[in-house]
């Protein structure tokens, strides 16, 4: 069995770096491979398909090349989250050392996520050019100097610049997904990408534990003054960057069969026009609806990673490392919450089709907004912790639910739409911090309440999303539109005459399950063998 | 009611190095019953210029929520009418800010019953500066520079090594 167009060696198809993000890219079987007696005979530790992509995953293994790459990939992404949010739990010390105002802190928090908007868009091109191994290693290694720079800053500007450049490293999300799409078969790449995305986001929570711990160790047993200890603490993420980048270079490889430079690439793609793919993506209103809503689940998660430790320290008078432990729970919940969102989306689809997915997303994300408002209202520590946990579950599950819907917006422009949605996420983080957490107009607790209201408002766009072949939240499907009609609208008549839309036709046929339980009454043709 | 005096230098008091010289006494003009006054706590407090846009140092009339006075100057002293003085070495964790000194008087139950401060009531005049340590050391600077250089050089080194070894193989 072969996967058609995921992670095929560097042909630079627009958006190809984000194939596999959603795991719903079509899988086609080529009969010629069935005739090949050597297919399936694997020199690898795991069973593979004809492109040497693994068909299963063994989480506890580090065997070359698949599982080793899996672990290198998610651990580098995790490390970048650790360093990007490393300043957050130490803010009570840093703000005294550098004489920061609330505005300075807010601007630095915004800077920490802004850099990644551009870097995520550029990372795809970099991976296409030099391969995910170098793409990942480049980014992780070159973001090490800004982490060391943090140890020597003395002014608010220095602090902001350092956080800005460290934030570029969040683009390892793209290299991670690209790398996984090259190593794992389409049937499981969705789960694999969900696990790596979730475990990478864990870093935002883990850092709230790691940094105060290191700080306390340097302050206590080693006896350094506070303002020296936090600077030394930053050497830990810095060294992690160097170690991970070296590991990726020494132990990693671009593809299961070797590195880009060692293999001659044989892509047999229909090369699509970049401008048409992008135009198709930006003219579909659903892209923008979900870019907004993703900004208020994933974006809000990034905002919380930046502000929550300081919030608990200031409002409840906790010690620094206690505030860090409480704050870390928010990010650590990603271990299970994000994948759960994906499972919930699939479950809702089995019963109610796409309408179920939309309802599930709207409900879960709006409930997250309610919990956020409640968090701001809670005056007791235990109440605030409970609300924070509930909020984390709903917000992070919404991120998983969103990517349960994205693949159905368009077949032709899936990669670009995924990229725009991802950028919308970090944009939401930037906007929220700008409005609510960088001036003294709002106290932090008011900021959190208002952020909750904004979440509820910015989830309303889901109500406007309508798929003519399946319906929307409020309106049923229109009877005369089929899946093929909807998806082939992406191709002009001239392009259809050339047969460029054939892949889309097959994809459209495979999406009939999104009609919901009634789809069982419709016979679905199997994919051509 | 109270007088609180201190000595300050024009360049600011250096944390970790200089000392603060604090004198307090019951003002001669005060007509109060001081029989309940038992101990005096001296505190280092933030002046208004250092509270602007820093809500974690906010003044609140409810004492349990007040964050103006973050640091103790020495340990609590027994109260006496004539007053007392203290020489206090400014600790290294004191941040850069404009400060004043406040003295709280406690009764035998530990409740605050009176106070005096070195600034005016609005906390805007008669403030002094403390120059904090930066926390930087030459060794930290050198280590950061070395590791940063290592990261860039090792990456470029790998890249060019693998590029030339491929070329060599193809040749």
Image (cartoon, coloured by chain):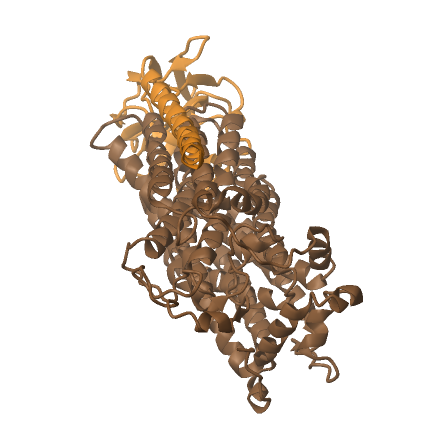
* For residue B54, above or below residue A482: above
Q: Where residue A230 sits: x, y (%)?
A: 35, 31
Q: Where residue A454 sits: x, y (%)?
A: 61, 57
Quadrant in which the N terminus of chain A appears: bottom left
Residue A62 appears in the figure: yes
- Quarter of the image for residue B144 reads top left
Q: Where residue A528 sits: x, y (%)?
A: 56, 78
Instruction: Name, please, the residue furthest toward the top.
Output: B10
* For residue A519, above or below residue A176: below
- Quarter of the image for residue B140 reads top left
- Quarter of the image for residue A94 reads top left
Residue sitting nearer the eye, A26 or A397 = A26
Q: How many marks?
A: 0
Q: Where residue A444 sits: x, y (%)?
A: 52, 46
User: Does B12 sit left or right of A62 as displayed?
Assistant: right
Instruction: Indicate the colour of chain A.
Output: brown
Residue sitting nearer the eye, A307 or B155 = B155
Residue A327 appears in the figure: no
Residue sitting nearer the eye, A376 or A521 = A521
User: Does A123 sit left or right of A33 as displayed?
Assistant: right
Q: Residue at x 63, y 68 (%)?
A: A503
Instruction: Name, please, the residue furthest toward the front.
Output: B171
Instruction: Name, please, the residue furthest toward the left.
Output: A221
Instruction: Name, please, the residue furthest toward the right.
Output: A493
Instruction: Indicate the colour of chain B.
Output: orange
Residue sitting nearer the eye, A59 or A461 = A59
* For residue A90, above or below residue B91: below
């Amino acid at each position: 069995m072969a996967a058609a167009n995921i992670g095929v060696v560097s042909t630079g198809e627009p958006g190809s770096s984000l194939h596999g993000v959603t795991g719903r890219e079509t899988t086609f079987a080529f009969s010629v491979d069935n005739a090949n007696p050597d297919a399936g005979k694997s020199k690898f530790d795991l069973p593979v398909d004809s492109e040497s992509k693994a068909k299963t995953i063994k989480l506890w293994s580090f065997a070359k090349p698949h599982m080793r790459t899996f672990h290198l990939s998610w651990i580098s992404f995790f490390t970048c989250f650790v360093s990007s949010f490393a300043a957050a739990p130490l803010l009570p010390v840093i703000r005294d050392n550098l004489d920061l105002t609330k505005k300075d802190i807010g601007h630095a928090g915004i800077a920490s996520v802004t850099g990644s908007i551009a870097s995520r868009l550029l990372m795809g091109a970099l991976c296409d050019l030099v391969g995910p191994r170098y793409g990942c290693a480049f980014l992780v290694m070159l973001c090490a100097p800004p982490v060391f720079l943090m140890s020597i800053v003395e002014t608010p500007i220095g602090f902001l610049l350092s956080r800005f450049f460290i934030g570029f490293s969040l683009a390892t999300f793209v290299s991670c997904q690209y790398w996984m799409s090259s190593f794992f078969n389409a049937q499981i790449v969705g789960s694999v990408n969900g696990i790596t995305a979730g475990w990478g986001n864990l870093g935002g929570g883990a850092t709230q534990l790691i940094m105060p711990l290191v700080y306390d160790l340097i302050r206590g047993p080693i006896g350094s003054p506070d303002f020296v200890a936090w600077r030394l603490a930053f050497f830990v993420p810095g060294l992690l960057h160097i170690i991970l980048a070296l590991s990726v270079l020494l132990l990693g490889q671009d593809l299961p069969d070797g590195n880009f430079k060692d293999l001659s690439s044989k892509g047999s793609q229909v090369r699509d026009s970049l401008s048409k793919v992008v135009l198709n993506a930006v003219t579909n209103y659903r892209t923008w609806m979900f870019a907004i809503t993703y900004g208020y689940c994933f974006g809000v998660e990034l905002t919380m990673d930046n502000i929550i430790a300081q919030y608990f320290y200031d409002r409840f008078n906790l010690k620094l490392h206690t505030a860090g432990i409480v704050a870390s729970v928010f990010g650590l919940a990603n271990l299970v919450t994000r994948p759960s969102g994906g499972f919930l989306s699939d479950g809702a689809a089995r019963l109610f089709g796409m309408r179920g997915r939309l309802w599930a997303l709207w409900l879960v994300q709006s409930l997250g907004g309610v919990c956020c408002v409640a968090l701001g209202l809670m005056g007791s520590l235990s109440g605030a912790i409970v609300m924070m946990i509930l909020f984390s579950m709903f917000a992070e599950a919404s991120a998983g639910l969103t990517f349960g819907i994205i693949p159905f917006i368009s077949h032709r422009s899936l990669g670009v739409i995924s990229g725009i949605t991802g950028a919308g996420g970090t944009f939401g983080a930037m906007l929220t911090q700008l409005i609510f957490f960088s001036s003294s107009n709002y106290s932090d607790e008011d900021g959190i309440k208002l952020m909750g209201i904004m979440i509820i408002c910015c989830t309303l766009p889901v109500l406007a999303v309508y798929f003519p072949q399946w319906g929307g939240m409020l309106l049923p499907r229109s009877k005369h539109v089929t899946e093929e009609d909807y998806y082939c609208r992406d191709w002009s008549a001239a392009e259809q005459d050339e047969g460029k839309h054939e892949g889309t036709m097959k994809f459209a046929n495979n999406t009939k399950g999104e009609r919901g339980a009634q789809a069982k009454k419709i016979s679905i043709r199997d994919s051509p063998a | 009611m109270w007088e609180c005096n201190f000595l300050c230098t024009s360049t600011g008091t250096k944390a970790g190095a200089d000392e603060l010289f604090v004198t307090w006494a019951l003002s001669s003009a005060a007509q109060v019953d001081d029989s309940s006054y038992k101990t005096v706590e001296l505190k280092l407090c933030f002046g208004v210029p250092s509270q602007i846009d820093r809500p974690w140092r906010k003044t609140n009339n409810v004492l349990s929520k007040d964050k103006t006075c973050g640091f103790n100057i020495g340990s609590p002293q027994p109260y006496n009418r004539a007053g007392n003085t203290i020489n206090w070495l400014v600790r290294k964790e004191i941040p850069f800010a404009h400060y004043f000194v406040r003295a709280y008087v406690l009764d035998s139950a530990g409740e605050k019953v009176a106070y005096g401060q070195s600034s005016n009531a609005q906390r805007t005049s008669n403030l002094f500066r403390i120059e904090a340590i930066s926390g930087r050391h030459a060794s930290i600077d050198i280590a950061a520079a070395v590791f940063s250089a290592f990261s860039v050089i090792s990456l470029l080194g790998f890249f060019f090594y693998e590029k030339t070894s491929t070329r060599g193989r193809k040749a």
